[in-house]
Image (cartoon, rainbow, N blue to C red):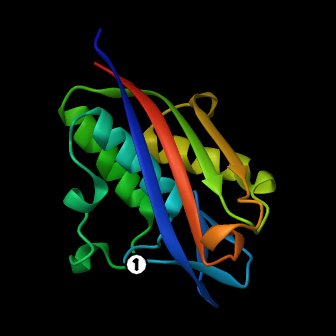
Amino acid sequence: MKIKVGFGFDVHQLKENHPFIVGGVQLEHHSGAFGHSDADVLLHAVCDALLGAANLRDIGFHFKNTDPRWKGISSLVLLQETVKLLKEKGYEIGNIDAMLCMEAPKINPHIPAMQQNIAEAAGISIEDISIKATTNEQMGFIGREEGVVAYAVCLIQK
């Protein structure tokens, strides 16, 4: 068995009166993440971790922000496509561990729904998905609620 580890990172700017999708869940908030797709920072970090572990480059390589096919698309679709790429190389996902960093809104109540969304899109058990959240203690662009950051690590196996 071959085991590999991947790391992913993503950041998105927050804009007033814009939808805020995280982990495939629409959050109620005065601002939301802005990007070419639905700007789901958590799923983008997860995709990058998975792609990196399989030596498949990054999310921008596969889902270019200049390609109209990906405009406004749910990042759950991007995760499904990422999993297809992994399977083509003979890999399956062992686990995913992710961290969100934002001041607001509170993420904890939404974690089970996010885990369910990721589990369904990736074809793995909720037990293999960990999502945590923290603030930036009101410092920097995160503390000023100008942006949101996510980190993810994963284990894949062949």
Whether residue 24 is visible here, answered yes or no, is: no
Residue ranking furthest to the front: 139
Q: Quadrant of the C terminus?
A: top left
150 vs 131: above or below: below
Frontmost residue, 149 versus 32? 149
What residue appears at the point 45 percent right and 33 percent down from the top-left corner? 154
Quarter of the view holding residue 19: bottom right
What residue appears at the point 27 percent right and 51 percent down from the top-left corner? 58
Q: Which residue is mark 1?
A: 72
Q: Is residue 36 left or right of residue 18?
A: left
Question: Where residue 133 sits in the image (x, y, percent)?
Answer: 70, 50
Whether residue 40 is visible here, answered yes or no, is: yes
Residue ranking furthest to the bottom: 17
Question: Where residue 80 sits in the image (x, y, percent)?
Answer: 37, 50
Frontmost residue, 83 versus 50? 50
Q: Is residue 88 left or right of residue 129?
A: left
152 vs 3: above or below: below
Question: Where residue 29 sits in the image (x, y, percent)?
Answer: 73, 79
28 vs 16: above or below: above
Quarter of the view holding residue 22: bottom right
Q: Is residue 7 left or right of residue 144?
A: left
Which amino acid type is marked by label 1?
A: Gly
Q: Is residue 138 left or right of residue 115?
A: right
145 vs 106: above or below: below
Frontmost residue, 132 versus 126? 132
What residue appears at the point 64 percent right and 69 percent down from the top-left corner? 140
What residue appears at the point 38 percent right and 49 percent down from the top-left corner? 47
Quarter of the view holding residue 92: top left
Q: Quadrant of the N terminus?
A: top left
**Label 1 SS:** loop
Question: Where residue 152 sits in the image (x, y, percent)?
Answer: 50, 43
